[in-house]
Amino acid sequence: MLFLKKYGFYFLLLGVLSDFLTPYILGLFYPEMNQMTMVMSVFGDVASPVRGAFLVWSVVSGVLFVLALPAIYETFRATSRVLAGWLAVAIGLYGIGDCIFTGLFSIDTEQSTWTLSTWVHNIGSGLGYAGFLLFPLFLILLYRKQGKARQSNIYLVLFIISLLSAGVYGLARIPALNQVPVLDQIGFCQRVSFFLNYLPIVVFAVGRIKDK
C-alpha cells in the first residue's frame, strides 16, 4: 500500500495516457473506423477487427486508474475523509465502470435489442463518465476547505469547461439533433469531451508529482 501511495499519481498519469491513446493507435488498424462520426466503444464491438486488443487495453487502463486510488485518498484524508473518499470513488467509477467493464462487457451494434453485456457496458460507462465529470467538483470543494482559492478556481474553470463539452456530446447522442452541424460528428464531440475531462486529472496528477 505504501508503494501505491508513493507512486499512485504516476499510475494515474499512465492511466490517462493509455486511455487517451487507445482509439488513435487502434484506429490505425481499423480502416473502416471514422474517428469523427463513430464513438470509441465501437472498437469493442463484436465485428471490430481490433476487438481483442481494445478489450485488453481497456482493462489495463482501468487497472492503472484503480492503482492510483490509495494515493488520491491519502492526499486529502486529513482535510476531509468523506470528500477524499468521494474523490477516489470518482476515479474508481471511471476506471472500473468505463474502462474495466468496457473490456469485460463489449457491445454488439448488430443486435436490435440490448444484450446483458450491452446493458452492463452502458450502465458501467454511464456511471464511469459521471465519476469522470465529478472529479474536479470534489477537488474544488477540497481545495476550498484547505483555503487554497487559486487551486479551487482552476478546477472550477476546468469543471465548467468539462460540463459544457459533455453537454455538447450529450446533444450529439440525441437522434433528433444528430443531423445538426458539429453534432453530426458524434465521434469528434466525444473525443473533445474526453480530452477536456482528462485535463483536471492530468493537472492534479502532475501537480502532486511536482510537490513530492
Image (tube, rainbow, N blue to C red):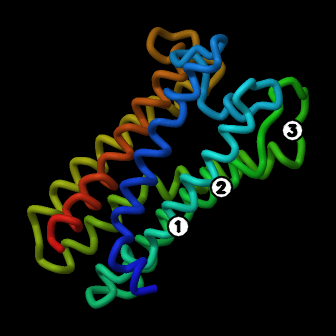
Label 2 residue SS: helix
- Look at label 2 and name its amino acid: Ile
What is the x, y in percent for residue 53?
67, 38
Determine which of the numbered discs, if any, sits on residue 66 in the image.
1
Q: Which residue is mark 3?
A: 114
Question: From the viewer's perspective, is the residue at label 3 or at label 2 nearer?
Answer: 2
Label 3 residue SS: loop
**In the image as oriented, which residue stretches furthest toward the bottom?**
78
Q: Give me the C-alpha separation between circle 1 and circle 2.
A: 10 Å
Using the image, determine if residue 27 lies above or below residue 1: above
**Residue 83 visible in the snapshot:** no
Contact check, label 1 and label 2, Cβ < 8 Å: yes
Q: Which residue is mark 2?
A: 100
Who's the residue at 50% across and 58% down the image? 131
Q: Residues within 10 Å of mark 3 (few under 14, many from 20)?
A: some
Q: Give me the C-alpha separation between circle 3 and circle 2.
A: 19 Å
The total number of labels drawn is 3
- Look at label 3 and name its amino acid: Trp
Label 1 residue SS: helix
**Residue 1 visible in the snapshot:** yes
Who's the residue at 63% across and 57% down the image? 97
